[in-house]
Each structure stands twice: as C-alpha cells, then as structure tokens.
Amino acid sequence: MGMPVLTDNIRGALIMIGAMCAYTFNDAFMKALADEIPLFQAIFFRGTAAVIFLAILCRFMGQLRFDLSRNDWGLILIRTVGEVGGTYFFLTALFNMPIANVSAILQALPLAVSLAAALILGEALGWRRLTAICVGFAGVLLIIQPGGADFSSYSLYALAAVVCVTVRDIAVRRMSRSVPAVFVALVAAVGVTCLGAVGSLFTEWAPFSATSGLQLAGATGFLIFGYIASVNAMRFGEIAYVAPFRYTSLLVALVLGMVIFDEWPNLMALCGAGVVVATGLFTLYRESKLKIRQPMVPDRIR
C-alpha cells in the first residue's frame, strides 16, 4: 500500500495546527519570562526580532510598498493601533492569569468579529449566527465568572484584547485586496515594538539571565514560525476548512498550563470554553456557507 495522498485542505489544516501550537508555545515562553523580565522590555526585544524578520521577508517577496492609497494607509494605521492595544492587553492578562483562561476568552474573537462586521460594515447577520454569538458571549461570562471567588480583574484585560483585535480584523476587511499582507504585518510589528520601547522608558530594565534569554529566543522563534505557518495554511487550504483548526490553541494552552504552570481552569470555566468554541465553530460554518470574506492577513503579531 502506498502512502495516503494529502489534499490541499488537509495539508492546510495540519499547517494551521502547527501555527496554533507555535503561537501558544510563544505565549508560554512569554508568560515564563514574567518572573524575570518586565512586560515592555520583553515586548521590545521580541518585537525588534520580528521587525527584522518581516522586513527581510517583505523585501524578499517584493511587498515593501509605500504607494498605497490614503484610505488603505488609514486602515493600516487603525489595524496597527488595534494590534498594539491587543498586544498590551493580551500579554498583561497572560502575565497575570492562567494561560488556558486567557486563551479561552480569546476564542470569542470570531463571534466578536461577526457582530462588529454586522454593526460597522453592515454585513448581514441572520438569526442563527446572532443566537450563536449571544450564547458564545454567555460562555465568556462562564469563563470570567464576574463576582465569583475565581474572578480575576485581568479577565477584563483579555476582553479588552478581544475588542482591540476585533478592530484590527474589521480594518483588514475594508482594505483593498492589493495591499501586501506581509507589509501590513511589518507595520503592525513596528507599532508593537514602539509600544515596548516607549513603555520601557518608564520601567526599570532587568538583566537577562541564561534562562530568560533562552525563553525570549524561544518566544521569538515560535512567533516567527507561527507567522510563516499561518500564511501558508491559508494558501494551501480553503479558509472555511482551515480556520476552525485555530481552536487547537486552546487545547495546547490547557496542556501547557497544567504541565508547565500547574494551572487548570475550574469546571465552570471549562464549560464556558466549550460553549465559546462550539458557537465559534458554528459561526465559521455559517460564514463559509454565506461566503463572507475572511481576513487574509495572518491573525497576530502579539
């Protein structure tokens, strides 16, 4: 018997799983850094490496363009502000909360983008998706548990990250298709690195130990690998088939949280995560049926 032939969709799904694993390992390395290195210092050094990589990639792919329309430049600026805000709020939550809880809240992003697209862009939103969005946000409340003994104020930072990333993705939907994806990501990476630089002016820097240096290198390496993989996943497979595999990140976050950080969400948070994932998958399914445009720019620099 010969080896089974991988279809483009299966290949894209496998690459997306690899991308989500890489992004979550990046998160774990950044969270581990919190014991030694201040947030803004970590953002600055990791961002500098990301900028260098994306600038080289942009140059290599011929995507280093500055002749864009004023409208597209405005949307790139809005996207960059969303990326910067998302990075700050996401990493602040990550430094202070269980990694699985933060990841679970971030899974509400497809729901938030669908709702924002209906409210801001006027995209049609049928009763099925609207119901799924409402149920999904109820799942987010189960994760956050406001007023409960396990409530963390940093959950609000994770929610703020969802809002910022929603703004980012809505901006992508309004961009011209001719805008180079890697160039957009490069501008965002510059913005995030500037956030680290400015924030570092007001915090005391800490020296890198061998451990923290390796952790930062690991975070940067996994971030770059995740970026490359997420680009290729969308190129190989159909978005409707590949996109649901983004939820792999939650499973990886659960395992890493338990093994590395000795963290495990309580039963209510796990149930909420299940609700968010289920409604997110349904929303992605309905959008694929309705042929709604999905953002083609890789989903994060943070």
Image (cartoon, helix red, strand yellow):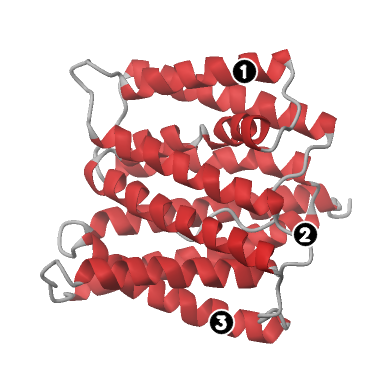
Marks 3/1: CA–CA distance: 40 Å
- Mark sitting on residue 132: 1
Taking the image as shown, residue 155 lies to the left or right of residue 200, namely right
Tell me which residue sits at (18%, 72%) in the image.
201
Q: Which marked residue is nearer to the observer: mark 2 or mark 3?
A: 3
| Disc 2 and disc 3 in contact, CB within 8 angstroms | no
Q: Earlier in the sequence, mark 1 or mark 2?
A: 1
Q: Which residue is mark 2?
A: 235
Amino acid under label 3?
Ala
Residues packed near mark 1 inside 10 Å, few (<14), some (14 to 19) or many (20 plus) = many
The image quarter in which residue 159 lies? top left
Q: Which marked residue is nearer to the observer: mark 1 or mark 2?
A: 1
Q: Earlier in the sequence, mark 3 or mark 1?
A: 3
Q: Which residue is mark 3?
A: 55
Residue 176 position within the rendered picture, expressed as x and y whole percent measured from the top left: 76, 60
Which of the pair 280/271 is nearer the observer?
Answer: 280
Task: Evaluate whether residue 88 shows in this view.
Answer: yes
Amino acid under label 2?
Arg
Amino acid under label 1?
Ala
Q: Earlier in the sequence, mark 2 or mark 3?
A: 3
Taking the image as shown, residue 132 lies to the left or right of residue 205, namely right
| Disc 1 and disc 2 in contact, CB within 8 angstroms | no
Marks 2/3: CA–CA distance: 21 Å
In the orientation shown, which residue stands out farthest toward the front? 70
Residue 178 position within the rendered picture, expressed as x and y whole percent measured from the top left: 78, 66
Q: Quadrant of the C terminus?
A: bottom left
Which of the pair 160/219 is nearer the observer?
Answer: 160
Residue 266 position within the rendered picture, expressed as x and y whole percent measured from the top left: 30, 21
User: What SS does tag 1 mark?
Assistant: helix
Which of the pair 80/269 is nearer the observer?
Answer: 80
